[in-house]
Image (cartoon, coloured by chain):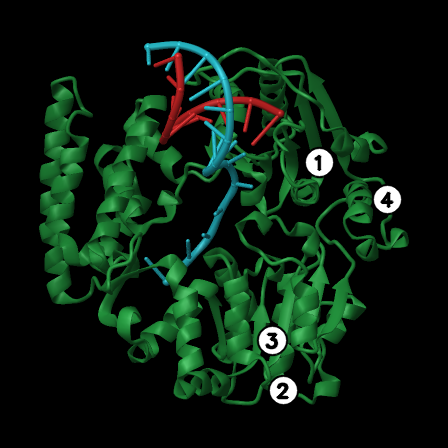
Chain colours: A green, B cyan, C red
Amino acid sequence: MILADNWLPADGLTLEPNALSAAKEKVNCLALTAGPGAGKTEMLAQRADFLLSTGTCRYPKRILAISFKVDASKNLKERIRRRCGADMGSRFDSYTFHAFAKRIIDRFRVVLTNTDALDANYTIGDKKVTRKQIMFSDLVPLAIQILENSTVAINAIRQTYSDVFLDEFQDCTNQQYELIKVAFQGTSIRLTAVGDTKQKIMGWAGALDGIFETFANDFSAIPLNMYRNFRSKPRLLRLQNEIIRVLDSTSVMPEDQIVGDEGEIFSKQFQTSQAEAESLADMICNWVELEKIPPSEIAVLVSKQLDLYANHLMAALELKNIPYRNEQQMQDITVEPAARLIVDHLSCLYGKREPKAWTRLMNQLTPFSDDEMQSSDRREFQYFFKEQLKSVAALESLGDPLSGWWDLVKSFLNRIGIETLVALSPDYESHTRLTEVIRDTKARIEELLELEPELPKALTRFVDDQAVRILTIHKSKGLEFDSVIMMAIDEEIFFGDRDANRCAFFVGVSRAKRRLILTFSNERERPDGYKKRWATRRTKQSEYFSYIDDFV
DNA sequence: TTGATGAAGTTTTTT
DNA sequence: ACTTCATCAA
């Protein structure tokens, strides 16, 4: 146990003054705003270390962290394990809003009565079925209802936690804030809310306006701001500062801390969207081949309707054989364990030598190889697999090696059995999810075979992360890249609320660590399949270009 | 069937 | 801003 006064940031890190005082706050709630790249996750990790190692969060009390995305929630948990160690880190719970609500529902389900009553084996789906099924949107309201009606439930929550962390708080919706208030308002539990109002781009989806001020009032929280940005090169920081001046003049970064001239910013204007696409593909090709930038460090950001705006670019990249990933249509099938299993199986069948895939496959199917039963299982599976190899060879001799690949997968899945598959992930307990993943995996491999007729190469693409990212600005939130291209910066695509759009533009700009490119085209031809197909004149978004003029 | 008119969607996460 | 879809009148 360390005395609070003697505590120093873990792993020898230094924090800026406001981050340090936030990390060491012992009594009050905190409303901590911080720009992009300020180290919000790090600050929370250090605060967790302070609370746990000084006993400010007194054993056996725990810390609860609530995020929006599963990824963010996992990252936070992982960072805290790194800073606090596995032992103290075990007193840190990290959930998404939905996961947190579902835990409350699962534990205190009996509190729900009448039309809201639920069976123990309820599911979450896309329509409400009395007692059997609820929808995602029901999770938070039902959790609120439980906490409002059951002193047992609310006391259980309040007695478990001494501290609550709220990440990306600028995106908090009415319902989510209601849950926080019902659970923690008027108690001595310390809440630490972290976020950036300049990056509030979910307003149209219900994120509350002025949530930091509301929170500061409701919870008597101390408002603090972190000013530094450790992500971007100085040139990019100065550009960000120009936009921050308009968005929120109180959180402009101190100029004297921005030293040097590193970083690269420029804009390009084109007559047609085709010319824009070809020029960008050339540029990306140079970055990858001459500058040796990893493709995954390059991102192309589009405000919205990515398939319409980036279709020429994707075709141009295709032509140059530059791997890219359209993050809009990838439902993250690549990280599904069942998909991985199928890909490993096919790699072993059709690949030349795939020792890694084989090892993964065997470990998934028979994790304990020294066990006698298991090793006989393994031999039986090897015999089965050899038979499959023979059928591949037979089809090959007929000159049609690929014809039966999905049949082989099906018989493989039947061989290993439904129980093995369900054990891969808790998601698969509902078999509908499992069949969905299997169906999507088949569809994705077929899609890749269109681009790359050789199956082993198509499979490499399936798992390959070495691809240029093409995504909407909204999807890019929280990510960072060496080089960022923001294309189609025109009035027409940034319709609607001016302030919200400026925030979106800021989010895009602040994803870049070293290099930022803006493009605009006078004409934009719509892709095939649209009824009206004449070229459309576009209007330059002059405000956004004006920010970068000084830096080109 | 065609044209006129108006509404709605576009940007998203979640077990 | 621009497209698509639904609805109604001709």
Instruction: Give how far apart the Cα atoms at labels 4 and 1 are.
Output: 15 Å
- Amino acid type of the residue that numbered disc 2 sits on in the rendered structure: Thr
- Which residue is tagged 4? A260
Which mark is first along the chain, 2 or 1? 2
Q: Is residue A164 above or below residue A74?
A: below
Quarter placement of the N terminus of chain A: bottom right
Query: Is the residue at mark 3 from the same chain as the one at mark 4?
Result: yes
- Which residue is tagged 2? A56
- Which residue is tagged 3? A48
Q: Nearer the viewer, mark 4 or mark 1?
A: 1
**Callout 1 secondary element:** strand
Chain of the residue displaying label 2: A
Q: Is residue A464 left or right of residue A229?
A: left
Seen from the viewer's position, the closer of residues A422 and A307 is A307
Instruction: Give how far apart the Cα atoms at labels 3 and 4 are.
Output: 34 Å
Quarter placement of the C terminus of chain A: top right
